[in-house]
Image (cartoon, helix red, strand yellow):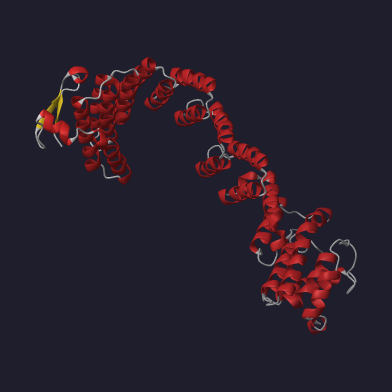
């Protein structure tokens, strides 16, 4: 009897024709065209297909599996096992072929099964998991991406369907894939909405939440988009000082002063941090409010961890004093900045700039005025020799080059009996506050 059925097994070419023409939409209560349904034949047909399937004889197993699906789809376990094997059968036939056209034909047959079997199983009263069939369909499309390249745009949508059926069964990889699919199709609004859902569904999953946060950072790149994103994040978590500081900086960068001051006042009352105080102080400084800027900078130093940014704080306090013309006070702050970090050569350059500024503000340009440029050059040279960064070395050297033409001339030095290498004190007239010595060049 087995040989009788074996003689009916399909050749490869006839199988392809069958895969293209057989309609899976036919009723399972209708007998197949090959053999009428007879309950006495169920065990035999099942046994024949199951044995061939187990041994990888997919082509010979197909007609008997078709018969079972038409006549006894729930036999013997009342589960979806026969339907799953149908998909596996066509995948097996596809993997055995070296012909891309043949592989695609087999895979299309399997895809038809994914699309139609759930309804057929429901009609037949068979127990199955719709999540599994939906998820496996997406995996099927993804795994056969090379042969089904034109259908890869559907993968993310099908994974999303699986998520909506039971999000708890999807791992981080598939959630990331869904977001990637939406973003790649420029559906940012859908991606944001989906991520909001995921954030609630996976509230305790650090890996998934990390993925969500990473995507949010990538999605909003323009200042306007980033501001909108940060505003929504701050609203959800008013205690995140890093988010608040970034939002405040963006407000400042985008000249949104009203929002910046409103946020600054609110945050400094609720969650004050040294970084926040420095950010607000810089905003005040840029707006010309040097009094409040200096106050905030000094208060930031008194806060836990505030001294970690001492060089920056002292430097900016120096800038505030310089803006008000208090050059001696500015120098004191720049000196403190450099003492806080002896590699912070910006402070040395700033002192040199102060001395240049003092010459420009004294209202005269005599030999004694020109001599101050030697002292300024001393600081620029010191900065160039101290810094390990070429950018600062170059900046300092350029400063020296720009003022060299103002040095006392040979005639000036002869007239004043200044000899190269002599010490010369800058402590007279409007330079009395300087009180430092330089070397005649």
**Residue found at x 21% / y 38%:** 382
In this rendering, the answer to whether 288 lies above or below 222 is above
**Residue found at x 47% / y 21%:** 264
Q: How far across and down, in percent of the image, does residue 3 sit?
A: 79, 84
417 displayed left or right of 429: left
Q: How far across and down, in percent of the image, does residue 284 sit?
A: 42, 20
Q: How far across and down, in percent of the image, does residue 10 sit?
A: 80, 79
324 displayed left or right of 367: right
Quadrant of the snapshot with the C terminus: top left
377 displayed left or right of 413: right
Compare residues 434 and 205 and report the one nearer the observer.
434
Q: Looking at the rendering, which quadrant does residue 359 occupy?
A: top left
Compare residues 6 and 14 and report the one nearer the observer.
14
Compare residues 165 and 210 and report the one nearer the observer.
210
Residue 366 visible (yes or no): yes
Compare residues 191 and 416 and report the one nearer the observer.
416
In this rendering, the answer to whether 127 lies above or below 376 is below
Quadrant of the snapshot with the N terminus: bottom right
Q: How far across and down, in percent of the image, does residue 197 sit?
A: 63, 38
430 displayed left or right of 70: left
In this rendering, the answer to whether 270 lies above or below 343 is above
Q: Residue furthest top?
A: 291
In this rendering, the answer to whether 251 lies above or below 16 is above
Residue 303 visible (yes or no): no
């Amino acid at each position: 009897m087995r040989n009788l059925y074996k003689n009916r097994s399909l050749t490869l070419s006839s199988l392809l024709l069958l895969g293209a023409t057989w309609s899976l939409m036919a009723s399972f209560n209708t007998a197949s065209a090959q053999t009428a349904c007879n309950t006495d034949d169920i065990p035999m047909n099942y046994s024949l297909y199951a044995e061939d399937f187990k041994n990888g004889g997919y082509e010979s197993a197909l007609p008997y599996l078709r018969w079972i699906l038409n006549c006894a789809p729930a036999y013997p376990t009342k589960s979806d096992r026969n339907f799953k094997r149908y998909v596996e059968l066509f995948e097996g036939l596809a993997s055995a072929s070296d012909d891309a056209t043949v592989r695609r034909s087999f895979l299309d047959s399997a895809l038809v099964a994914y699309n139609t079997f759930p309804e057929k199983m429901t009609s037949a009263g068979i127990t199955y998991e719709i999540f599994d069939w939906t998820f496996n369909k997406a995996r099927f499309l993804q795994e056969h991406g090379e042969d089904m390249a034109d259908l890869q745009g559907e993968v993310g949508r099908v994974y999303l369907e699986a998520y909506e059926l039971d999000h708890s069964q999807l791992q981080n990889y598939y959630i990331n894939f869904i977001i990637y699919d939406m973003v790649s199709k420029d559906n940012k609004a859908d991606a944001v909405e989906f991520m909001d859902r995921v954030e609630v569904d996976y509230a305790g999953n650090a890996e998934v939440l990390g993925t969500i946060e990473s995507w949010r950072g990538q999605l909003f790149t323009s200042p306007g988009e980033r501001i909108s994103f940060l505003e929504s994040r701050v609203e959800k978590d008013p205690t995140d000082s890093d988010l608040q500081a970034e939002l405040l900086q963006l407000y400042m960068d985008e000249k949104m002063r009203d929002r910046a001051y409103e946020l600054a006042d609110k945050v400094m009352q609720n969650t004050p941090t040294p970084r926040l105080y420095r950010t607000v102080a810089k905003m005040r400084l840029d707006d010309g409010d040097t009094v409040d800027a200096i106050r905030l900078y000094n208060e930031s130093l008194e806060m836990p961890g505030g001294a970690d940014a001492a060089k920056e704080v002292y430097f900016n306090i120096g800038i505030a004093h310089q803006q008000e013309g208090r050059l001696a006070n500015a120098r004191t702050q720049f000196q403190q900045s450099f003492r806080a970090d002896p590699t912070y050569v910006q402070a040395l350059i700033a002192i040199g700039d102060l001395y240049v500024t003092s010459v420009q503000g004294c209202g005269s340009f005599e030999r004694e005025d020109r001599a101050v440029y030697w002292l300024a050059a001393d600081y620029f040279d010191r900065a160039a020799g101290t810094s390990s960064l070429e950018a600062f070395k170059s900046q300092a050297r350029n400063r020296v080059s720009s003022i060299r033409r103002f040095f006392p001339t040979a005639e000036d030095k002869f007239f004043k009996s200044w000899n190269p290498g002599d010490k010369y004190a800058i402590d007279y007239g409007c330079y009395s506050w300087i009180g430092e010595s330089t070397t005649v060049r």
